[in-house]
Amino acid sequence: MLCQFRKIPVFAYLAMAWILLFARPDLYAQGAGAAAVSSQTRQDLQLRQQLKESDSQGTSNRAVEEESVTAKALPEDMGNLPIMTEPARKPCFYLTVDTQAFYNSNVLYAESGGQKFAAWQIITTPEIGFAPSIQEERYSMFFPRLGFRYQFFTYAQSEPGSPPYNSTGISANNFQVMNPFASLGWSFSDDLYLTFSANANLYQGSGRDWSAYANFLDEYPLSWQATWFRPIADWNSINVTGYASYVLANPTNFTRTDNNLTLAWVVNPLDELGLQAYASFRLAKYTGTNVAGQFDNSDRLDFQQTYGFSATYTPVEYLSIRAFVSWTKSDSSVAVAETGDFEALNAGTGLNLIYRF
């Protein structure tokens, strides 16, 4: 097995809106806001990862294929026969730290004016993973990946909110997510790529005191993603990505299915500069039983549309700096105070560092 980490350019998209998931009844009073924002932000990051991976497929697949063997010409006095040599081994482990700060115009993703207020959110994500490429020609189209990320969600200065946020402060919503993951990619061609993945999202919160954190929600998504990549010229391309997942949740009072379609246009005017505009559409179906004191979650259907733009500057191989903006509109078949029907604007900046070994 030839270890090679497939370099993924960093594009941040905090765009998609998500739906309020459920905390345990005994934690609901103190953790409802954290549950709402955590699941929404989780969807934001899933979309961002989806766009990162879709943007990389066309170039990375060709690079892997070209590096499987290297031809070197012999000196002229020895004739024109070429010899084949194996490429140098490359690292198959990676360590990355990503941080981003952005302004959210509707931090609770609420429809009613009394619950709508803005805040700054900071997300810090260290991640370690194993991403080899397979040297055996018969299986070289497969790309396994195994890793673990830990995410820290912090809420900073905000506008005055409604009770209880006007007294406890927005930092009462701080939480963390542990996220082990595994995936298997399959490159059908230079233009088409398919990925199957399994994740566990374990939520801990809320507030500033980490020692008092309690687990309020677990999600277990099983998903597939298909990406079609088409270069238009040397400096721009289009990506079409379809994503579907089935999510089990603990407490087990509901399940969820998601279907996403994302259209992206990528422009690289300079080697160090990447620009991307995209539109994303999501249809989510919730099924389950209602729990007293929590939001109605039975037979709920949500449709969300998101439009975004980002600029990423990569001055050196291991560092990327980005700026982004996105707008989301959500419509739900069930009228709820939070995360059903809403509009939200996100805008901010981010930094990514990566080390391969």
Image: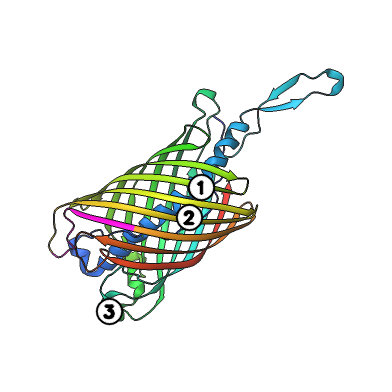
Residue 162: assigned label:
3
| Magenta range | 293-304
Quadrant placement of the C terminus: top right
Q: Give SS at disc 1.
A: strand
> Which circle, 2 or 1, is nearer the viewer?
1
Q: Give SS at disc 2.
A: strand
Residue 247 lies, in percent from the top left, at 28, 47
Residue farthest toward the right in the current orientation of the protein = 77
Q: Mark 3 or mark 2, which is nearer the start of the sequence?
A: 2
Relative to 264, 105 lies left or right: left
Which residue type does callout 1 highlight? Ile
Query: Does residue 214 lie above or below 254 as drawn?
Result: below
**Which residue is identified by label 2?**
126
Quadrant placement of the N terminus: top right
What's the CA distance linking mark 2 and mark 3?
33 Å
> Which circle, 2 or 3, is nearer the viewer?
3
Colouring: rainbow
Check contact, mark 2 vs mark 1: CB within 8 A: no
Q: Mark 1 or mark 2, which is nearer the start of the sequence?
A: 2
Q: Nearer the viewer, residue 289 or 25?
A: 289
Residue 265 lies, in percent from the top left, at 51, 52
Check contact, mark 3 vs mark 1: CB within 8 A: no
Which residue type does callout 2 highlight? Pro
Residue 238: assigned label:
1
**Badge 2: residue crowd in 10 Å (few <14, some 14–19, many ≥20):** some
**Badge 3: residue crowd in 10 Å (few <14, some 14–19, many ≥20):** few
Q: Nearer the viewer, residue 107 or 183?
A: 107
Q: Nearer the viewer, residue 336 or 196?
A: 336
User: Could you tell me how many numbered marks the image carries?
Assistant: 3
Q: Mark 1 or mark 3, which is nearer the start of the sequence?
A: 3
